[in-house]
Image: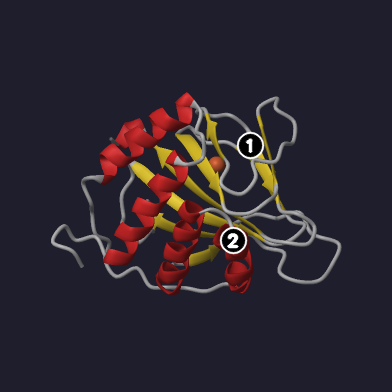
Amino acid sequence: MTETGRTEAVKAFLGAVRLGFEGSSPQAQTRACLARVFDRLSDPVVADNVPAARVPTSDLIDQALQPALQADETMAALAGCLRKLDPDLPWRMRGGKDVQPGETGPTTIANAMIVGPGGLEERRDVWVGVSLVPPGVRYPDHRHSPEEIYLFLTGGRFRHGESGWFEPGVGGSLYNEPNIQHSMEAPADAPLLAVWCLYDPRHA
Ligand SMILES: [Fe+2]
């Protein structure tokens, strides 16, 4: 732990997330949300011994980190921090029914909360987590009231509002305005890995 109560691994990861977003040519809205998130994160809170947990899909993490490790220095550093943090992560299967791929293998989306409800740092004002989507699987349409920013460590497709499907690419970011419907889909032959941050002013 540091003197502020945040573990070194979480501190390094959050710093790398910030640099990753800053290096992603963010839209103005993404940049503004990022500033709100990290303003709140300057005040750390420590959770009570949240246990690490694995699910079948979390075994795809090494494969999912490869594109970022082979990208630029900033994304490689983020992937390195995530790899270091992975053994501590409370991985969970996403609730609900996921779209099934045509081939065998993990079919359930895994999420891990680093900061936020049930995360390594328990809080409600800011959520920072990762989603790992198995090859060929689609993260179903969903919406939530907090605004949200995404940073992609792999390929894959995204859709929000009326946008139609598009590919943010490795190191790409995007902004979801409050309550906008959104979904994403892994490539047919590779997992999708993304970091997301939500800012909830109701708890700020
Ligand atoms: Fe979302």
The residues bearing labels 2 and 1 have C-alpha atoms spaced at a distance of: 28 Å
- In the rendered image, which quarter is residue 136 located in? bottom right
Please name the residue that numbered disc 1 is placed on. Answer: 182
* Badge 2 amino acid: Gln
Residue 89, x across and y down, in percent: 43, 67
Density class for disc 1 (Cα within 10 Å; few <14, some 14-19, many ≥20) is some
Residue at the left extreme, as displayed: 3
Of residues 185 and 178, the one nearer the viewer is 185
Q: Would the CB of label 1 be found within 8 Å of ligand 1?
A: yes
Q: Residue at x 34, y 68 (%)?
A: 50
The residue under label 2 is 70
Ligand 1's quadrant: top right
Percent across and percent down for residue 80 are: 46, 65
As drawn, 178 above or below 114: above
Residue type at tag 1: His
**Which quadrant: the N terminus?**
bottom left
State which mark lies toward you, 2 or 1: 2
Please state which of residues 97 and 44 is positioned toward the viewer in this rendering: 44
Q: Quadrant of the C terminus?
A: top left
Question: Which residue corresponds to the image point at 46% horizontal and 47% vertical from the top-left?
Answer: 20
Compared across the picture, whether 182 is left or right of 14 comes to: right
